[in-house]
Image (tube, helix red, strand yellow):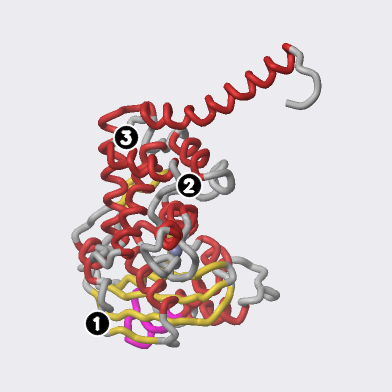
């Protein structure tokens, strides 16, 4: 310390020092007292120490020559990318309603975790974090990844178990409702459609499938449509789905989309200057034909099959493809719908 020493200066220095020490020990204290299962605490311990074995860290330790993310192969895999920013992780946070909440962006990983866990969604947050890490490891070590439905169900199961074990201190959720794919009247067919975009704007794809009231797959479609904003694939999916149904001779249709924006546009009066007016008019023309069509909103949780088709479309470079058999990977989602498996949704 330069200059003249006074007791006041000494005292201030000491206070600062002890506060910093408290900051650092604070997180360990928090972690020790945390109500969570040991494997989750261990994961947090690794993150808090800055030694989560992501590919960036493994590269630094010469355990790999590739720093890239094993899931998206799009970015360098550091801790933030691994647990939050990777597309595969982001999807989970978005579905569970964390994206857009206070402090979800920014900060450092330690503060981020503590803040999220101390919110009233703490158990759900920790379960999601754990299963995001598990998903990452499936991709990294070429274990079989059993799919998003499997991973989502595990998240909810773990969150509910923790909730049962530790009670109300960290609530799983304010309220959840169960959502499932609903069977429709036997003389109708149902089209589930969805759009997908990797970024906004980004690569876009649209997809959908037509099912009988038993839940059996009749026909599906996927279409990769270049780069655009995320509303276009939603509209495109509705247009292509209706067109396919018409071409196949179905005349009683229920069409389900999870895009409220797209549905709002279709019923809006003033769309003459909208940049997608051609597509909107195309859909309206289809609706005026001599058939019965009900276009309805559905929650994402009842639209996983269409979501799968849309993501599939985004990942390949093909234009319109018609599927008379379900593509590989869709089977288990179809089965989940037929069996009436429901998914919780926060309301
Ligand atoms: Zn990634």
- Label 1 residue near ligand 1, CB within 8 Å: no
> Magenta part of the protein: which range?
240-254
**Label 3, residues with CA under 10 Å away: few <14, some 14-19, many ≥20:** many
Mark 3: secondary structure: loop
The relative height of residue 254 versus residue 279 in the rendered view (above or below) is above
At a point 25% along the width and 72% down the height, the residue shown is: 212
**Where does label 1 land, which residue?**
325
**Where does label 3 land, which residue?**
36
- The x and y percentages for residue 31 are 39, 32
Mark 3 or mark 2: name the one nearer the start of the chain.
3
Front position in the image: 159 or 256: 159
CA distance for labels 1 and 3: 44 Å
At a point 25% along the width and 37% down the height, the residue shown is: 161
Mark 1 or mark 2: name the one nearer the start of the chain.
2
Mark 1 or mark 3: name the one nearer the start of the chain.
3
CA distance for labels 3 and 2: 19 Å
- Which mark, by number, is residue 98? 2
Query: Residue reaching furthest right?
Result: 3
At a point 39% along the width and 80% down the height, the residue shown is: 222
- Label 3 residue near ligand 1, CB within 8 Å: no
Front position in the image: 14 or 265: 14
Mark 2: secondary structure: loop
- Label 2 residue near ligand 1, CB within 8 Å: no
- The x and y percentages for residue 108 are 55, 44
Residue 265 is left or right of residue 91, and the answer is: right
Residue 85 in sight: yes
CA distance for labels 1 and 2: 36 Å
Image quarter of residue 139 = bottom left
């Amino acid at each position: 310390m330069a200059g003249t020493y006074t007791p006041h200066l000494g005292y201030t220095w000491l206070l600062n020092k002890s506060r910093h020490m408290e900051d650092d020990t604070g997180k360990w204290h928090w972690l020790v007292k945390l109500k969570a299962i040991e494997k989750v605490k261990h994961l947090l311990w690794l993150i808090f120490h800055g030694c989560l074995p992501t590919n960036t860290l493994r590269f630094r330790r010469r355990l790999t020559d590739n720093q890239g993310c094993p899931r998206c192969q799009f970015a360098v895999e550091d801790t933030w990318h691994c647990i939050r920013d990777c597309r595969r992780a982001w999807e989970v946070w978005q579905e569970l309603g964390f994206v857009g909440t206070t402090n979800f962006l920014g900060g450092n990983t330690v503060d981020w975790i503590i803040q999220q866990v101390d919110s009233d969604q703490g158990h759900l947050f920790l379960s999601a974090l754990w299963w995001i890490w598990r998903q990452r490891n499936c991709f990294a070590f070429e274990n079989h990844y059993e799919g998003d439905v499997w991973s989502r169900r595990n998240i909810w199961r773990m969150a509910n178990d923790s909730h049962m074990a530790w009670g109300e201190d960290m609530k799983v959720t304010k309220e959840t409702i169960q959502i499932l794919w609903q069977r429709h009247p036997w003389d109708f067919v149902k089209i589930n459609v969805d759009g997908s975009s990797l970024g906004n704007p980004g690569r876009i794809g649209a997809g959908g499938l037509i099912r009988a009231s038993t839940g059996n797959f009749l026909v599906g479609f996927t279409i990769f449509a270049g780069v655009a904003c995320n509303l276009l694939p939603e509209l495109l999916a509705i247009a292509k789905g209706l067109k396919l149904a018409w071409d196949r001779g179905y005349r009683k249709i229920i069409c389900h989309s999870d895009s409220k924006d797209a549905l709002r546009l279709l019923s809006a009066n003033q769309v003459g200057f909208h940049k997608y007016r051609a597509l909107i008019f195309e859909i309206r023309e289809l609706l005026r034909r001599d058939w019965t069509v009900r276009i309805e909103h559905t929650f994402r949780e009842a639209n996983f099959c269409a979501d799968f088709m849309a993501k599939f479309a985004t990942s390949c470079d093909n234009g319109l493809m018609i599927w008379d058999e379900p593509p590989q990977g869709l089977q288990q989602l179809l089965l989940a719908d037929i069996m009436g498996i429901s998914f919780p949704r926060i309301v």
